[in-house]
Image: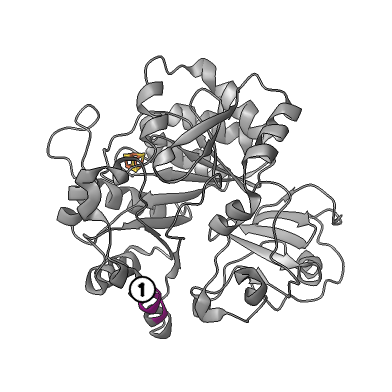
Amino acid sequence: MSAEATPAEGPPAELAPLRLDGESIVGAGGVFRPERFGGLAYSRECDRFYAMDTKSFRAMRSFTQPTCPAPAGHGESSFVGEFAQRPIPDRPMVVNCLVTAYCPLRCRYCHADDLMGPFRAGESDDDLDRIVRTAELVPAMVAVITGGDPIVRPDRAIHVIERLAESKALVLDTSGAGDIGPLLPAMKAHNVHLRVSLDAASASPNDEVRPIDRRHLPLGTSSHAQALETIRRARRADVRTTVQTVVTSRNEHEAELLRLHDLLVDLGVRHWALHVMVNAGRGAQPRSRRLRPSGESLARLPATVDRLRLEGSPVHVRITRTDQQPNAVILVNNRGDLYAERGGAMGKVKIGSAESSASEIEKAFRATIDLAAHADRYLMRRPATLGRHGDRAAQE
Ligand code: SF4
């Protein structure tokens, strides 16, 4: 998506006229939603949000599909236009739906454990309608189909994809450790963006931090090899794919990250998200202390991304925030109950149930979710671009 939007000659056929107090418009390329500061756009192509001022958002009517920035736009801000103050959306942007509490891996930095272990026993298909109902009542633009790992329960994931696809753009998160085949037709049919986790170019540093759970996979299975195979199959099926990498002490050095970058280029992956390991869940346990990346490496990370841009890499790279702000993340567990992530070691707190009414769900997220922190999590900002396209206001 270009910051220089072309003036509209009239709305394209597939888009209804915009009302600034209106609901989301879900299109083939993405989702648009008017906000008091202008509007939000989400691109399915690159799994990325943009916050636009009113002028830029109106001009977006000339696009039928929000597209990704050109490769030269690596690391650019998510803010398009001029903002008198920090743009904070009125409603949530993302709701995470745990379609299963089962996962084939036992990652050493996992912080979803508190919504998995206690909820595995008795996981039932009767819960699927409850998950869908609660997710529909959260007025988010994007639903992330996650777990656990949807790859181990494809039937459950497909059910939720088919029910939510009309009202939200969808993303599916997976370790890739399993058979992605059953999921690909539904993902393709509903424009679902796939995110696969891969932490290193070679198997050993990846498999050390992302070991298999032997209840799901045979001894000797490499999570690295499985993720590579999943990426290759998704690419062959023409499913848009982002690779997600958790930055730890095992892969924090530039040489290691550049090796992984080169592998992604070879695989044809064009979107790469670098998440810095957070101090939560298993990552907060004393035995994981040595996995935390050094401050020095984290400080160098933006320069590594800039270097890739300057060298003309075809891969769009983004770095997510390194801290976990409380009450920034909204989750629906595998029973259809609504949770907020408290951040750090505090885990999740239940704020609604599958039996809650629409007004109770709205009251719950308005009382609990910090929409400024929520937006910070999903809108990228870079000190290096301070002062361009409204970043100054966004940094305040
Ligand atoms: S794949 Fe995700 S949910 Fe599963 S153990 Fe790893 S981090 Fe946790």
In the depicted structure, whether residue 132 falls above or below residue 201: above
Residue visible at 21% across and 42% down in the picture: 211
Q: Position of residue 286 (x, y in %)?
A: 23, 44
Q: Nearer the viewer, residue 267 or 290?
A: 290
Q: Amino acid at mark 1?
A: Ala
Indicate the position of residue 240 as horizontal and vertical percent values. Answer: 48, 55
How would you classify the magenta stretch by its main secondary structure? helix
Residue 132 position within the rendered picture, expressed as x and y whole percent measured from the top left = 60, 28
Horizontally, residue 55 falls left or right of residue 274, namely: right
Q: How is the image coloured?
A: one colour
The N terminus is located in which quarter?
A: bottom right
In magenta segment, residue 113: no
Return the x and y of residue 53 as percentages of the image width and height.
Answer: 76, 68
Question: From where the camera sits, is residue 209 visible?
Answer: yes
Q: Spot the residue most to the bottom.
A: 310
The residue drawn where x is 23% and y is 60% is: 249
Residue at point 25%, 29% (across, down): 216
> Looking at the rendering, which quadrant does residue 103 occupy?
top left
> Quarter for ligand 1?
top left
Q: Looking at the image, which is closer to me, 178 or 273?
A: 273
Question: In this rendering, is residue 174 above or below 88?
Answer: above
The local crowd at label 1, few if under 14, some if 14 to 19, many if 20 or more residues have their Cα within 10 Å, is: few
Residue at mark 1: 299
Check the image and report above or below for 257 versus 182. Answer: below
At a point 72% along the width and 74% down the height, the residue shown is 81
Up the image or down, 205 lies above or below 330; here it is below
From which residue to which does the magenta span run? 302-306
